[in-house]
Amino acid sequence: MHHIHYVHLNLCSVQSLVCGNITFIPLQINCFSFSRVYQIEDDASNLDEMPLMMSEEAFENDESDYQTLPRARINQRRRGLGWFICGGWKVLCGSCCECLARTCRRKKELKARTVWLGHPEKCEEKYPKNAIKNQKYNILTFVPGVLYQQFKFFLNLYFLVVACSQFVPSLKIGYLYTYWAPLGFVLAVTMVREAVDEVRRYRRDKEMNSQLYSKLTVRGKIQVKSSDIQVGDLIIVEKNQRIPADMIFLRTSEKTGSCFIRTDQLDGETDWKLKIAVACTQRLPALGDLFSVSAYVYAQKPQLDIHSFEGNFTREDCDPPIHESLSIENTLWASTVVASGTVIGVVIYTGKETRSVLNTSQSKNKLQSSLFDTKHQTTCFLLSQQFAVHYVVKIIWLQLSLSLWNSLWNSLWLSLWLLEGLRTLVVAKKSLSEEQYQDFESRYNQAKLSLHDRGLKVAAVVESLEREMELLCLTGVEDQLQADVRPTLELLRNAGIKIWMLTGDKLETATCIAKSSHLVSRSQDIHVFRPVSNRGEAHLELNAFRRKHDCALVISGDSLEVCLRYYEHEFVELACQCPAVVCCRCSPTQKAQIVRLLQQHTANRTCAIGDGGNDVSMIQAADCGIGIEGKEGKQASLAADFSITQFKHIGRLLVVHGRNSYKRSAALGQFVMHRGMIISTMQAVFSSIFYFASVPLYQGFLMVGYATIYTMFPVFSLVLDQDVKPEMALLYPELYKDLTKGRSLSFKTFLIWVLISVYQGGILMYGALVLFDQEFVHVVAISFTALVLTELLMVALMVRTWHWLMVVAEFFSLGCYLASLAFLNEYFDLSFITTRTFLWKVCVITLVSCLPLYIIKYLKRKFSPPSYSKLSS
């Protein structure tokens, strides 16, 4: 019999903060557990016995299939009837639906293509339209889609079944409108909200698709809509205009033959990118000459990678034909913006085949309950926002005297500046003879024409040149952070939040920002994960990394992809032990993938924060998304569940509003349950005494009034309650960590409220039956009045800090009930409810049902006070 091993890690809460281009992932993990329970072959089995942890010599001599062996050593626990009842049916239904959907919409295989300049009709295949569509429904699927999204949850389906059961005479209790009116109201509000959102999405899509661009034709320039652009079209894009599709850069109005573009909405990087036009087309005298040449572009198949491209430009009407290699420097990706000059490009990818769309994941419908997982006592947050780079920089220039400075001093200065979080740059020079330059140029051009491993070959040629150079100077640049970034990160750490940073910036930039923001302390070691490209290199690097302790991890997107391909489980486990993780050069797809990995391997809820279009996929993949409105636009805030304006607001959002929201939701949810269960207990006691006759205790307006004007306002006023002041919650963020224990909402608290409901319902019903005279209408009057008073007193028992609206709600509800007694002659005996007998019986029953709970609360606060009460006192 195999033993089950649970992995317990003493880590803080995990979240992810992203700065437009930078994403922090704070993870709160008190008990780190995986979404699946695994069985290891024996007790001695641990991480060191995994194939990943073999010695390097043993790894080289081993011929096992390591892509499947780690998972072969781990057998998934059998899923039985209990798993199916407790939610497994959702997993099975979801898997079946996904499989059916994939079968119905089989994707066309993406292939490399040959695109002729200005001749879309020569395209070999039919390519997708260049239309943006973010709508979730259409006219036919709106009503069925909204109803499915509502009733796929068990509780909503339960209320629908209960309402439908009232059409059966033997099951009918009360009036139909008491069941269908609340359900219909909720559905109506939901449909109106979805319709408004759908109309907004339609208008945004229409606005984007209707943007006009200049298309170059044989007859001159014509205006076309963005949605009408096709592969092979020659499109002119002006300065500050969005690029509508993926294009190859052919010409520019700049004399240098290059231009700058802004890519912050694609990769999150704020630096402008230099793009170079194809030399052959840039040398043409006029725009019209593009149609006088016979040329085409060979482009690789559409891919997710936004940092690489391989292709060739060929002009056939020359002798010999002209061939030029194309790289990422010659591309203009969709959703980027031209920052200088006017550019002309040939469209190679449109619509859903563009890099921006391929890196956007499908949005999911979210059901938010709480960011705290009380089952595992963990919290997982993913926050993302651009807190870092302003355009105010402090530059330190150090000129070197070769007679005084040596390599030791140079290394010392570089180390000191790196510890300060400065971006360092070493300036050097090298003189080349004519023969040396011609040899370099020949090898460089040959490497650029290669279709396979072009980047590695070009890097090798450049590296051969960067030797024996003369050192000129060192520079250090300091980034200016937004206000209160460091205190906010410190606040999150004290709240038990472990932070990961996901960014599209380069490794050096990401490391400097992590240090300057104090995400990584000066005294903390940093393990820079060296570039890996295959399973063997990933194995050796992970082996080296696991030997380090209390060390921050910095890894690039390419290395991360290789590690997740072969060692997903092991990498996530090692990374979650680090005090901080920085993932640089991350694409939007990789950011969303990391979110899903944390959800899968830690079983935690995630919260993602972003401020740019490149963060949308991550925000949509997380359980809760927070968008920041900034200079990068409103894409993130529109796709998010919550929106803020500055990074420093994250602290208050989490430790004040998040904490209050959790405690208030827990109190309100359990009290609403108590309100329904107590009246159900009274009905059960009443029916059991009278031989289970199908006679309702309360009917008509009494049921409606109890659920609305008699108790609704005091109950919902609990959302105004708070145990500590906001200033105190910010001063002591450890209170936030306290919530991860799940004491406010757990099976224990649920059981306590059930017992309270049964006790009070039994007291109210039995008390009314014992004290009534002979009339059934007296039982109804006594028990219902005591019930309303009990609910009002229970709300007062729950309150920790009184708000004036709470007091108004209490007295308003009591006044409404007393005023309505004069109109309830159908249910009450008005002559009886004005007697002293009625009053003392109601008071005695109410006192017996509530007084013990007040006494228990006083004793608990006296001898075992909660942490917040100690601060309040």
Image: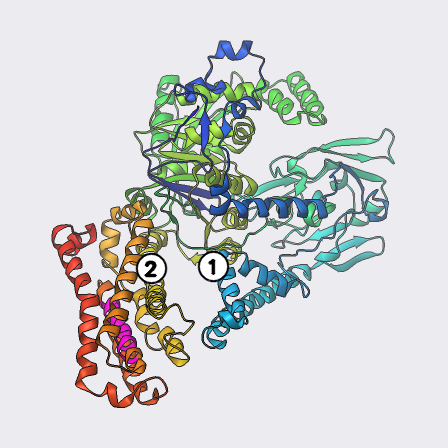
Which numbered marker is on residue 670?
A: 2
Mark 1 Cα within 10 Å, few/some/many (few <14, many 20+)? few
Q: Mark 1 points at which residue?
A: 155
Judging from the image, what secondary structure is the residue with disc 1 in?
helix
Question: Residue 693 placed where, x, y %?
Answer: 41, 71
Left or right: 286 as drawn, with respect to 519:
right
What secondary structure characterizes most of the magenta part? helix
Do the numbered discs 2 and 1 sit on residues whose CB atoms are within 8 Å? no
Residue 227 in view: yes
User: How far, Cα to Cα, is label 2 from label 1?
Assistant: 15 Å
Looking at the picture, which amino acid does disc 2 mark? Gln
Q: At 69% from the left edge and 62% from the top edge, which residue is drawn?
A: 210
Quadrant showing the N terminus:
top left
Question: Residue 290 placed where, x, y %?
Answer: 81, 45
In the image, which residues are magenta?
Answer: 781-796
Vertical side of 135 occupied by 523: above or below: above
Judging from the image, what secondary structure is the residue with disc 2 in?
helix
Vertical side of 447 occupied by 726: above or below: below
Looking at the picture, which amino acid does disc 1 mark? Leu
